[in-house]
Amino acid sequence: MMLKRFLPKSGIDYLKPSIVVLFAVFIAIKAPVFFTINNLISVLSQGAVIGIASIGMSMVILAGEIDISVGAMVYCTGVIASELYLSTNNLIISTVAAVVCGGFFGLINGFGVAKLKIPSLITTLSVCNILSGLGSILIGSEGTLSAGERYKIIAQTKILGLLSSAWIYILLFLLFLIIIRKTRFGRYIYAIGDNQDALRACGIRADFTIIMIFVLTGMLCGIGGLVNTSRLGGTQFNISLGMEVYCIAAVVVGGISMSGGRGNVLGVFFGVFIVAALDNLLRLMGVNVYMYNVVWGIVIFGVVMIDILKKKQKARDLERQVFET
Amino acid sequence: MKKVLVLLLACLMIFGMFACSSTTGGGTGSDPAQARKDDGVNRIGFALADISGQAVQTESSAFESTAKELGFDEVIMLSAENSVETQITQVRDMITSECDVIVIYSVDADGIVPAVQSCNEAGIPVIAVDRGIKSGDILCSIASNNISDGRDVANYFGTLTAGEPEKSVKCLHIIGNLSSTAQKERADGFRLGVDSWGQLTIVSEVATEADADKIYNAVVDSFKTNPDIKAIFVPYDALLSPVVSALKEIGKYYPVGEEGHVMLGAVDGATEQLEWLSQGVNDISISLDFQGFGAKAAEAAWAWLQGNSVAETIQTISIPCVMGNVDYLAKNGYLWGLSK
């Protein structure tokens, strides 16, 4: 009986595992380096920044909203952190500034969405444009900023064989996993995505929760910006812009519904790993960089298609059960 | 009251539309040739792909100051933020603004052609600077010999490793922006240079769209498949920073002269990378004449306006900078990126 629970129930359920197995065999033949421990550890650090930002993105999507300013927030907070480090030589000041500024940018998003009732797409698009311009103004005419050797300890220190960037991501992920699964705030996120009006009718401050979701996403992006600039040893014009596409992909691949209210946050960890691993694999195989987008498009389309098919299958099963009863 | 307000607003909109259409008459929709008339003002336009980076800033400042010194009354400079659509619109706006000459530092050598054709139809000469333009009538092209710049880097790697066994010096070739003719030519030059030295071989070529994050990951991943890479070429200096960070992450960073050093070469001659040469971080940086690009473009435009002949191609001089000569070159003012 126990084993039956884990076995796929229909043909569609076999589809995802079969694709994964076939894909794994293909990788093992074409790029055997991929499965080495060193490479898998490296993939984890390569995906750290996307992962940190994806934690925020998963909360936003679970709440039925979207945040396309994620990449710009990572860019701008990264520039602020490296600029401040260059002028003060103090890691604590630059870290706090990145997180606080990220939180402030998130507050603007949250206020626009929750209080002014502007669609999240429009609000975050505006903030995205403002921040990408602001970041470039702050970098100045040089176009690049080198933050110095000490700044790199944030992301490039090795602890138990893993880079600190990966540890920061893992710890943040665990923290937010607990917040989303075990706290009232986490339940409200799901409830907002499922039925916001019902939540309001129960007297729960949905607006405050939405603002908090965007503020936390901004703060996570602040940490992402800090980690990214530390990892690269500085920053350059327009770095990280467009990262939101990878974050959305990671969240969708991880199994969170784009319409909000449904999905397992733990899946996002695997989603991020798949995003980083696919990028890494394409590089190991020497695929042209412009093919990456084609592959990405196919992957996201495939995952969404499988989920739609599964949903349809479930609805049919439910209908049959009702009919039989 | 509401009806009156609506009527007033409608009248205002109609008036606004008429006003706009009268000010943009002869714009992109109409015949550009009619748009250009001699208003007695010497006007020059400079359409820049972007204004990010020290090199472009140097180029545009030199262009502006030279143009004003020569006697241009008005200098219009617009940045397309690396969008070819924006650049086409900007060039067409320059036609409407009655520019006498238009200088283009193109986002894309092919993509900008429709804008060049509009200039040709309007009888406005086009000067291509820094990056080439694939077709259309170009009055003058100003650039460095990008093929030679790329080849110089390979030749330096070849000289440093002379006597090594055949195909033993593995090179990683980082490719930047595929739409830039300058970067394509530098890549071709590097390949040519590598082919002329028996010990050099390119084991991996990675297109990175000049994105620091992609370059970082590309270096980390390339060493997994080829752990004994001994040289890395990037198309321009600003892209060296993520390469150095990646080498440090994987424990492959050793300064020049130390055992295990990975040779690093790039083109541009930016300040930080020239300073790195003295510190032994990188091996070679080809310093381009960005001041020359800007100044020569303005001079060619002025010469045409005065009725003088203009050379079809003007090539600027590039200077290979290495640890041994960078201080001397900087002290004598040969480098745009560094002065001591």
Image (cartoon, coloured by chain):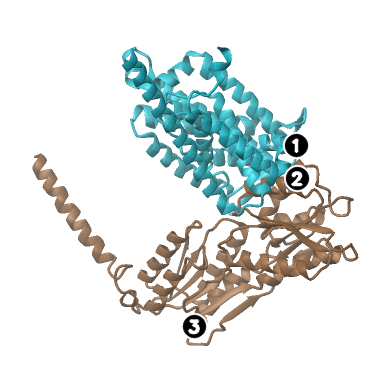
Which one is in front, B47 or A283?
Answer: A283
Residue picked out by circle 2: B224
Q: Residue at x 54, y 33 (%)?
A: A16
Query: Taking A267 as reference, is B259 above or below it?
Result: below
Quadrant hosting residue A202: top left
Left or right: residue B295 versus residue B115 is right
* Chain ID, mark 1: A
The answer to the question of whether label 2 and label 3 lie on touching residues, with beta carbons closer than 8 A, is no
B245 and B325: which is toward the camera: B245
Query: Answer yes or no: do the residues labelled 2 and 1 have beta carbons within 8 Å?
Result: yes
Task: Answer few, some or many: residues within 10 Å of disc 1's Cα (few below 14, many 20 plus, some between 14 and 19).
Answer: few
Amino acid type, mark 3? Trp
Q: Which mark is residue B214?
A: none
Task: Kindly state the secondary structure of the residue where label 1 is placed.
Answer: helix
Question: Which residue is drawn at the image coordinates 88% and 54% (left, top)?
Answer: B257
Instruction: Give the residue pinned by disc 3.
Output: B304
